[in-house]
């Protein structure tokens, strides 16, 4: 199975996908006149404006839900894998992907808002919705929806749960073994898998509002605590920081900086971590209650910065400044070996060793606990994304119990992923991420060339901002944007008035 997964990833994650992801980021950056820089201050301001409603969540809650998907295993184990397989310079390419990807995140999230719908008392949207409405290609929308259900409901959850169980083994030991149907498994992994599944079930059976309330509390605190720990470690080793930065920049264009090394692994793990272009962010963006679609696009663009430039950089600096990493060639030969050979790069072990080298005896459990919250909130985001795409399909085919089956399938995937090997779990996850990225990036590029709705929304928002309006409005029809039914109905019902959420 591992060989099959590796073969599929070799096709999906070919240089073509890397070029597509970077190329889309460059293209949208120029088309939006580098919105990720020009409106940085507006992004920060918007984080704390807007209110939730009976049908939608607040701007900050939408940020928290999307961040719960972006800030996860990729920020701890993913960064370690990028360094372990691509060398320290892979970190540079993660930064590049984040900077360019912020513009892509704006475009896809603004599209999510423009073409959102009301469904059973809540807002829903995402690539499947905007592909059908903006392009009129229902078959493509269905293809994305089915791919996303498989990816976020079955393939990706195993990566998160595997990292939780792997971190638990490093922190609490794996000596006690038990023979099961799945083979010999450590008691630590088995108990961890069962515990995660139980807590996950309690929350996902509570619906999107419970997910939003949980993530808006957990995400800020877990990210802040992790970054503060990283800053302490960097501060204690501040004299090494210039050498670490030089190390990151030393090999970015070398002969090894191709697929499978710095560029390949930096882009691959960068997309996995910040999810810009993957098509996951628009789902949370569509659920937000905002006065103008561009507002949520800007907030989601800022979330890419939080994920990569803050949290991923914190992990990278901790690993590199303490030297707690190995670098392995595609042939399995150690190029650099600083820690035991048995430590898998596709795991949180490098990060745990880095923190434990400074805070002996505390570092490994701390990272294990941090990873639990990072990964667990990502599992909640995956469920919400899968649920949204099931809801999209359910508009055409009403099969009783679809949501219930999805919940059980995701919980089974979480349990299975927790007890499997890290390489297999990550390989399956990479398939899911890669397929979604292919379908979504191609779609948003075609939509841009056909009608430019996200760019029209941005120009309209900037014009109103320049005019100093106290209440933003969005008239899609006036802007030449078709099939934005939610916004046109809102105008028709006369709901665009001062007591609506404003920013």
Image: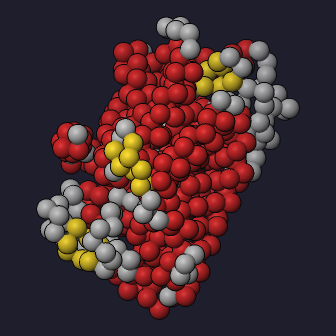
- Quarter assignment of residue 247: bottom left
Q: Residue at x 82, y 28 (%)?
A: 497
Q: Residue at x 35, y 32 (%)?
A: 439
Q: Residue at x 37, y 38 (%)?
A: 181
Observer-nearest of 65 and 97: 65
Q: Residue at x 52, y 34 (%)?
A: 411
Residue found farthest to the right: 499
Picture coordinates of residue 115 (x, y %)? 56, 24
Check the image and report above or below for 70 versus 499.
below
Residue found farthest to the bottom: 239
Number of on-image labels: 0
Assign the C terminus to one quadrant of the image. top right
Q: Is residue 88 visible?
A: yes
- Is 489 situated left or right of 399 in this image? right
Picture coordinates of residue 292 (x, y %)? 67, 35
Picture coordinates of residue 337 (x, y %)? 26, 77
Observer-nearest of 195 and 82: 195
- Is 202 situated left or right of 329 in this image? right
Check the image and report above or below for 176 versus 493.
below
- Quarter assignment of residue 249: bottom left
- Color style of the picture: secondary structure
Check the image and report above or below for 167 versus 466.
below
Observer-nearest of 209 and 337: 337
Assign the N terminus to one quadrant of the image. top left
Q: Is residue 74 visible?
A: no
Check the image and report above or below for 145 versus 197.
above
- Is 465 situated left or right of 181 in this image? right
- Quarter assignment of residue 104: top left
Picture coordinates of residue 311 (x, y %)? 53, 63
């Amino acid at each position: 199975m591992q060989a099959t997964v590796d073969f599929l990833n070799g096709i999906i994650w070919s240089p073509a996908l890397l070029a597509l992801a970077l190329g889309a980021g460059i293209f949208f950056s120029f088309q939006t006149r580098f919105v990720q820089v020009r409106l940085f201050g507006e992004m920060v301001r918007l984080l704390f404006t807007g209110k939730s409603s009976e049908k939608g969540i607040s701007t900050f809650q939408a940020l928290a839900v999307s961040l719960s998907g972006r800030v996860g295993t990729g920020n701890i184990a993913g960064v370690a894998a990028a360094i372990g397989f691509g060398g320290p310079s892979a970190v540079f390419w993660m930064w590049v992907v984040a900077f360019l990807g912020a513009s892509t995140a704006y475009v896809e999230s603004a599209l999510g808002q423009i073409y959102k719908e009301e469904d059973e008392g809540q807002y829903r949207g995402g690539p499947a919705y905007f592909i059908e409405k903006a392009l009129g290609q229902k078959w493509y929308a269905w293809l994305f929806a089915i791919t996303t259900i498989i990816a976020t409901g079955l393939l990706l959850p195993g990566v998160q749960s595997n990292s939780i169980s792997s971190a638990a083994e490093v922190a609490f030991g794996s000596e006690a073994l038990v023979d099961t149907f799945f083979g010999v498994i450590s008691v630590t992994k088995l108990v961890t898998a069962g515990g995660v599944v139980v807590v996950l079930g309690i929350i996902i059976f509570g619906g999107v509002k419970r997910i939003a309330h949980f993530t808006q509390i957990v995400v800020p605190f877990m990210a802040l605590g992790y970054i503060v720990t990283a800053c302490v470690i960097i501060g204690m080793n501040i004299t090494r920081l210039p050498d670490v930065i030089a190390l990151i920049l030393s090999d970015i264009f070398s002969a090894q900086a191709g697929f499978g090394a710095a560029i390949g692994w930096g882009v691959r793990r960068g997309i996995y971590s910040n999810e810009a272009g993957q098509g996951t962010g628009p789902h949370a963006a569509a659920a937000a209650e905002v006065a103008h679609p561009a507002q949520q696009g800007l907030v989601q663009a800022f979330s890419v910065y939080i994920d990569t430039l803050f949290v991923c950089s914190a992990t990278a600096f901790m690993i590199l400044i303490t030297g707690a990493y190995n670098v392995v060639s595609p042939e399995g030969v150690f190029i650099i070996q600083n820690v035991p050979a048995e430590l898998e790069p596709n795991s949180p072990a490098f990060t745990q060793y880095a923190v434990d080298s400074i805070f002996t005896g505390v570092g490994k459990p701390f990272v294990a606990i941090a990873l639990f919250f990072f990964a667990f909130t990502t599992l909640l985001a995956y469920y919400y994304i899968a649920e949204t795409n099931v809801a999209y399909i359910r508009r055409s085919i009403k099969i009783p119990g679809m949501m219930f089956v999805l919940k059980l399938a995701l919980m089974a995937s979480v349990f299975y992923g927790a007890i499997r090997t890290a390489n297999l779990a990550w390989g399956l996850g990479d398939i899911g991420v890669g397929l979604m990225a292919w379908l979504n990036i191609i779609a948003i590029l075609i939509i841009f060339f056909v009608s430019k709705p996200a760019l029209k929304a941005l120009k309209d928002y900037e014009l109103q901002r320049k005019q100093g309006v106290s209440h933003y409005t969005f008239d899609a029809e006036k802007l030449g944007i078709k099939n934005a039914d939610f916004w046109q109905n809102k105008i028709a019902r006369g709901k665009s008035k001062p007591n609506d959420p404003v920013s």
